[in-house]
Image (cartoon, grey):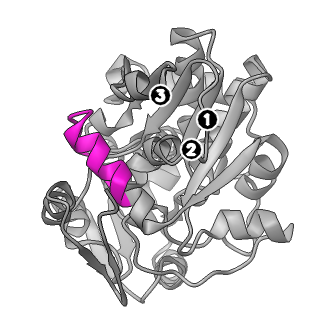
Amino acid sequence: MDGMVDLSAIREAARRLGPKSGVLRSPLIPAALSRKLGAEVLLKLESLQPTGAFKLRGATNAIASLSAEEARRGVVCCSTGNHGRAVAHAAGVRGIPATVCLSSLVPQVKVEAVTALSARVVRHGQSQDEAQVMADRLAAEEGLVQLPPFDHPQVIAGQGTIGLELLEDRPDLDTVLVPLSGGGLLAGIAVAVKSLKPSVRVIGISMERGAAMAASLAAGRPVEVEELPTLADSLGGGIGLANRHTFALCRDLVDEVILLDEAEIYQGMRWMLLQERRVVEGAAAVGVAALLTGKVRARGPTALIVSGENVDMTQLLTVAHGAPVKLGDITVENRT
């Protein structure tokens, strides 16, 4: 589990994630937003992965790296949904048992998606941190191998393959906007992109409600935050007070972190569906939202990581119609 995440580790991950791995080399396509902004915006469609999100890269790389003895024991993870689905899929491909711990905040659609892949699902707690406690317990009691959703060298390296593909497809890339939660995606992409072309701006985008990595970077150390309901539910959860990899990588390599309120994420989801014709979850719409609000300005070719499509369709249709969305104790209104 120990290891250094560098360009060579990411290139090794890219070899593991070849055509036979089941991981898609996702397309990089022009965005309709380019016309509105007068600048070239590109969408990296990780939402097209077989499990509907980028998480398949890291999970597949990590599971492919397990020894025969580790594979025999089986794996356990905690997740906000997409990592669990990816672990279940990758474990199924290798023929090993998988257990996924999910908190009560994970939408039912994501729970059902994990269950459909024949993984054991354990619901526990009111936050990802509490679900992690259950994953720790099961690992200790049953001898399962932990596969963290982000703070793991092989997971980070797997996500970093996106950065390689971005620069292979667009060597002239100026900026990449990356959804930010625990930092596995942002750290991996930042390692790849900054190693190959340091001038590229790498910007993390998160939500104001419970952005653990943003709060940790501001504090200069990993800190806990309250996990709150958000349209960008995949970005929820802490980074771990004992964070070993993603905090330092994000601190050292990321140019900026931008936070969005719920109404701004709402507008990003609406734009992605109505203008880009893409079904995406809130976390995957934060890049578009950051550009629409002007919190980030596109200078040259700008790539947005469209991280996943595993959205509650009832919620998305509510957003599409411009109707209010209830999130715990707040109501998100359409500002347009």
Please give the label number shown on residue 294: 2
Mark nearer the N terminus (2 vs 3): 3
Report the residue marked by disc 3.
37
The answer to whether mark 1 and mark 2 are in CB contact below 8 A is yes
Which amino acid type corresponds to the residue marked 3 in the rendered image? Leu
Above or below for 78 versus 152:
below
Viewer-closest of 201 and 100: 201
Residue 87, percent from left and from top: 38, 53
In what element is the residue under mark 2? loop
Q: CA distance from mark 1 to mark 2?
A: 6 Å
Residue 239 visible in image: no
Viewer-closest of 145 and 210: 210
Looking at the rendering, the stretch of residues picked out in magenta corresponds to 266-281
Above or below for 27 versus 177:
above
Q: Magenta span has 274?
A: yes
Q: Residues within 10 Å of mark 1 (few under 14, many from 20)?
A: some
Q: Residue at x 53, y 74 (%)?
A: 209
